[in-house]
Image (tube, helix red, strand yellow):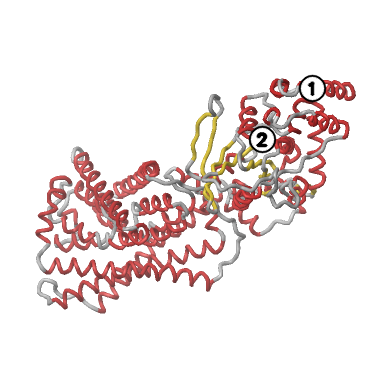
């Protein structure tokens, strides 16, 4: 497999691998074989684009961090040959032969394998550690092409990985093969040509000193026989006899075949490629191909149009649950629990009453969050994860997530955020890169959760109009994209590509789904319940002890001077730190009315909702952030979002006051 039978990859010509801080992998192949898609799948968000030194040819590179290794992936130009006739060919040839990447991954089109193997055989002649990635296996199957990739691997002496890169299939296997190749450094089997050509190549090679031209001896001999001008010039100074002999042998072959030597060598490569295809490829009628259930579903789930429709329907179902069913269950639970233990007067109550009211209010808040929102979300997540849909949806949204500095897996926390930010923050654990994990958590705290939605709809949509409510949503999404890009640039660390196994579809295992849902819910209860109870007791005590006025006075420079709101709203925002929709309850209690348009102007209503939407996350979210990332980062996010909310609120108040 590695060209050194019996040595285990540890002989004089095949030295043991020395551990390096960074390894280099080159992607090489013809144009339009899926090379760029593979590059994007491997490297994800962190990609750099520029030109090769001294050349106008574009150079793209990115980082793959996988199985403890840091791997720099270089996307070579799409070419059909490495004869150095064009700048692209020269760049690829020099990089592979002189820069010595640890592994070269040759990507080929399974539906046009013979034509692509012509380039593969040239890479084989360069004798670099090589992997053959056979892409577009789905197109090949549609044409009735069946590839025995294990046999092809045996013939070439290198790993052969079947892929459908655009669907993410085979990327995990390719990543594993790259890591294994870095250690084993597989050398391809040299594929002999016809006897009369092979005999002349051997005789030229015997005349070459070691290292002549900086290329492997066989490659140099072939290039001399082809009459490659660069090779002739480089070798002539070191081995003039070899150059003279090669020119003589070339004339002999041209006399025999009546064609130029370069054409003869190309014909030899095509003949070898044809033989390889003949030995490893079978052709069947497309109708005879067995289509698996996974392939049938993937035709819809990964379709460029139907797949997004299916995804929109699933996400739409989640949002319907959040805004309609979940909200109804939450209201019903609130009414039921309030009937069990009616709250007593806070102003005249004893310490026991204050503690009871605060604790009970916090318990009601936790129950009306976890049962209608958190458990259904976790249950749905476990179902799509166990069924195999999760990886498909993540893959489909990967490119879109790149706009925010994330990859496709981040769609799960972002969607969960529409229900509740706490489980959304905790679900960021599925993201491997610490940088992307923290970035996802930061953006999740900006997603309009169900509590924020209640504030927007209950204040702006009800008392101004629905269009201003939608405008606030749009502003929030724009902020998420802008802040995501800025944070991606400013945060230290590196991102990684989305390397995920593409499992077969199957019916979810119900006991496993329920168990996973309970495990996630249990970890959440430990954060949410104490936070709500302690926070509610603190605010209830402040209310009973008459501390609300001093709080309003302390916050008036912000609420009155900057935001143009009544001073009484200062303490309302403090209530909102417990749970965002408590701002509406506190506002109604303090103003003595639920008709907010009678006490606040349209501009004030919009500004109030804008600030409530963006300022500090609720206390349970802050605790979740501290649990995952530490208090320093949790408080940094809180301070940043509070400052952003105040700044945008102040700007909005002054702009809206001009025309409303």
Q: Is residue 53 left or right of residue 148?
A: left
Tag 1 secondary structure: helix
State the image quarter where residue 209 is shown: top right
The total of numbered circles placed on residues is 2
Tag 2 secondary structure: loop
Task: For the C terminus, give its image quadrant.
Answer: top left
Q: Is residue 542 left or right of residue 197?
A: left
Q: Neighbour class for label 1 at 10 Å: few (<14), some, many (≥20)?
A: some
Q: Position of residue 535 (x, y in %)?
A: 23, 66
Camera-side residue: 456 or 463?
456
Q: Neighbour class for label 2 at 10 Å: few (<14), some, many (≥20)?
A: many
Name which of mark 2 and mark 1 comes first in the sequence: 2
State the image quarter where residue 237 is shown: top right
Looking at the image, residue 46 lies above or below residue 572: above
Q: Position of residue 624 (x, y in %)?
A: 34, 61
Looking at the image, residue 42 lies above or below residue 430: above
Residue ID for mark 1: 241
Pick out the residue farthest to the right: 256
Q: Residues under labels 2 and 1: Cα distance? A: 35 Å
Q: What residue is rendered at 73% in x and 21% in y?
A: 236
Looking at the image, residue 324 lies above or below residue 250: below
Q: Is residue 436 left or right of residue 174?
A: left
Q: What residue is rendered at 78% in x and 49% in y?
A: 285
Q: Is residue 76 left or right of residue 642?
A: right
Residue ID for mark 2: 30
């Amino acid at each position: 497999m590695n060209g050194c039978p019996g040595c285990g990859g540890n002989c004089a010509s095949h030295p043991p691998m020395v551990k390096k801080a960074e390894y280099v992998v080159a992607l090489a192949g013809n144009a339009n074989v899926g090379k760029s898609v593979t590059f994007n799948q491997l490297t994800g968000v962190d990609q750099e684009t520029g030109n090769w030194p001294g050349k106008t040819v574009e150079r793209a590179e990115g980082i793959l961090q996988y199985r403890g290794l840091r791997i720099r992936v270089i996307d070579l130009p799409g070419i059909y040959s490495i004869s150095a006739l064009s700048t692209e060919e020269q760049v690829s040839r020099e990089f592979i032969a002189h820069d010595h990447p640890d592994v070269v991954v040759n990507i080929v089109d399974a539906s046009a394998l013979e034509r692509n193997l012509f380039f593969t055989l040239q890479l084989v002649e360069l004798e670099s550690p090589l992997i053959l990635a056979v892409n577009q296996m789905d197109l090949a199957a549609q044409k009735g092409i069946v590839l025995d990739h294990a046999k092809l691997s045996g013939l070439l002496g290198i790993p052969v990985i079947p892929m459908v890169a655009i669907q993410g299939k085979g990327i995990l296997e390719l990543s594993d093969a790259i890591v294994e190749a870095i250690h084993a450094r597989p050398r391809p089997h040299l594929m002999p040509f016809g006897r009369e050509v092979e005999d002349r190549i051997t005789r030229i090679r015997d005349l070459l000193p070691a290292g002549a031209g900086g290329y492997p001896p066989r490659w140099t001999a072939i290039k001399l026989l082809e009459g490659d001008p660069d090779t002739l010039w480089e070798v002539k100074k070191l081995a003039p006899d070899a150059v003279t002999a090669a020119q003589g042998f070339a004339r002999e072959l041209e006399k025999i075949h009546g064609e130029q030597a370069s054409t003869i060598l190309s014909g030899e490569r095509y003949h070898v490629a044809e033989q390889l295809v003949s030995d490893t490829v079978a052709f069947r009628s497309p109708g005879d191909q067995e289509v698996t259930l996974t392939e049938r579903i993937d035709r819809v789930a990964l379709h460029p149009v139907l797949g997004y429709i299916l995804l929109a329907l699933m996400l739409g179902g989640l949002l319907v649950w959040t805004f309609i069913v979940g909200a109804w269950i939450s209201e019903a639970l609130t009414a039921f629990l309030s009937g069990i233990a009616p709250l007593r007067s806070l102003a005249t109550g004893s310490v026991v009453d204050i503690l009871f009211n605060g604790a009970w209010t916090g318990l009601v808040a936790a129950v009306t969050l976890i049962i209608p929102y958190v458990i259904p979300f976790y249950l749905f997540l476990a179902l799509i994860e166990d069924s195999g849909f999760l990886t498909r949806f993540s893959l489909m949204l990967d490119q879109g997530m790149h706009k925010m500095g994330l990859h496709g897996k981040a769609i799960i926390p972002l969607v969960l955020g529409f229900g509740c930010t706490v489980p959304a923050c905790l679900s960021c654990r599925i993201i491997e890169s610490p940088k992307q994990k923290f970035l996802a958590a930061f953006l999740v705290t900006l997603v309009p959760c169900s509590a924020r939605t209640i504030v927007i709809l209950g204040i702006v949509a009800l008392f101004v109009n629905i269009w201003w409510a939608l405008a606030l949503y749009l502003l929030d999404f724009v902020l998420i994209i802008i802040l995501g890009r800025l944070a991606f640039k400013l945060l230290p660390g590196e991102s990684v590509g989305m390397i995920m196994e593409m499992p077969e579809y199957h019916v979810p295992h119900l006991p496993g789904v329920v168990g996973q849902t309970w495990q996630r819910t249990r970890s959440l209860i430990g954060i949410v319940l104490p936070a709500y109870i302690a926070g509610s007791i603190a605010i209830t005590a402040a209310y009973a002890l008459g501390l609300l006025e001093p709080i309003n006075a302390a916050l008036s420079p912000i609420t009155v001077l900057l935001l143009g709101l009544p001073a009484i709203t200062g303490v309302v925002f403090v209530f909102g730190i417990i749970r965002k929709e408590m701002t509406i309850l506190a506002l109604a209690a303090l103003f003595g009315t639920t008709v907010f348009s009678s006490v606040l102007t349209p501009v004030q209503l919009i500004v109030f909702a804008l600030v409530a939407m963006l300022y500090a996350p609720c206390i349970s979210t802050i605790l979740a952030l501290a649990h995952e990332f530490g208090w320093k980062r949790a408080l940094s996010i809180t301070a940043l979002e509070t400052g952003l909310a105040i700044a945008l609120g102040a700007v909005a108040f002054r702009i809206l006051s001009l025309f409303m």
